[in-house]
């Protein structure tokens, strides 16, 4: 049980980097679309389209889709990998999901601190002078709820991956 060993092994893990980099890319896709189009509204991701009080953003569908990968699932996988190396054994389902929850909460906390720092800098988008580049602190509770639910994202993704591989294998045998 060495913290340094577990941290070093986690940072060397291909699975950690795959989930983290993929999550960051998914997070940046709407940002790139906004800058490419010059509009803060992405029609198919802009539901409900208007803010509900201060806590439900106008792009809630985008927020759920994006945050379930980063920081949510990336943090969940980091927690799972770290815990496995820390205890040097395979994790029981209960320990796996508790470690995923802890990792997701840690990542979303770090990301929220970064967002808060950026929000306080008041960096506005050039094409929409009334829109801060960073998230308002009012939506942070939603980020935590999404992160708590995103501990199941890796399980769903791995299930879909296995299903697609089985279908592809089945199709190649029959042809």
Image (tube, rainbow, N blue to C red):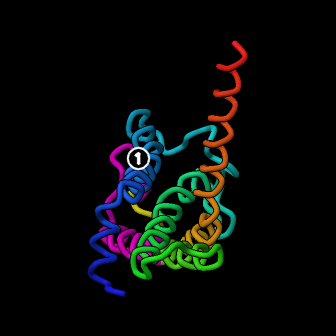
Residue at point 35% right, 60% down? 13
Depth check: 6 or 138 in front?
6
Q: Is residue 74 visible?
A: yes
Of residues 117 and 92, the one drawn nearer to the viewer in this rendering: 92
SS label for mark 1: helix
Q: Nearer the viewer, residue 138 or 30?
A: 30
Give the answer, above or below, for where 24 lies relative to 102. above
Percent coordinates x, y for residue 53 in the rendering:
67, 69
Depicted 10 relative to depicted 36: above or below: below
Q: Identify residue for label 1.
A: 25
Residue at the spot 27% in from the left edge and 71% down from the top edge: 8
**Residue 144: percent from left, percent from top:** 57, 74
Residue 30 x, y percent position in the rendering: 47, 44
Q: Quadrant of the N terminus?
A: bottom left
Residue at x-position 46% and y-position 67%: 75
Give the left or right position of residue 1, taking residue 97 as reference.
left
Instruction: Inspect the magenta stretch and tell me whether residue 161 lies in it.
Output: no
Q: Residue furthest bottom?
A: 1
User: Which quadrant would the C terminus be assigned to in this image?
Assistant: top right
The residue range painted magenta reads: 106-132
Residue at 35 percent of width and 68 percent of height: 10
Q: Nearer the viewer, residue 26 or 151?
A: 151
Q: Return the x and y of residue 68 as percentages of the image width and height.
A: 57, 58
Residue 151 figure quarter: bottom right
Badge 1: how crowded within 10 Å, few (<14), some, or many (20+)? some
Residue 138, can we see it? Answer: no
Q: Looking at this rendering, what residue extends furthest in the top direction? A: 175
């Amino acid at each position: 049980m060495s913290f340094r060993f577990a941290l070093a092994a986690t940072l060397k893990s291909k699975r950690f980097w795959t989930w983290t980099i993929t999550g960051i890319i998914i997070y940046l896709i709407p940002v790139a679309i906004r800058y490419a189009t010059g509009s803060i509204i992405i029609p198919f991701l802009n539901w409900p389209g208007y803010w509900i009080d201060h806590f439900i953003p106008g792009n809630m569908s985008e927020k759920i889709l994006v945050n379930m990968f980063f920081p949510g699932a990336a943090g969940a996988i980091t927690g799972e990998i770290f815990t496995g190396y820390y205890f040097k054994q395979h994790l029981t389902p209960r320990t796996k999901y508790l470690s995923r929850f802890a990792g997701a909460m840690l990542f979303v906390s770090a990301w929220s601190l970064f967002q808060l720092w950026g929000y306080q800098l008041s960096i506005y988008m050039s094409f929409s002078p009334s829109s801060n580049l960073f998230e308002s602190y009012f939506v942070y509770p939603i980020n935590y709820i999404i992160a708590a639910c995103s501990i199941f994202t890796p399980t769903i993704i791995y299930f879909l991956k296995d299903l697609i591989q089985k279908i592809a294998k089945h199709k190649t045998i029959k042809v």
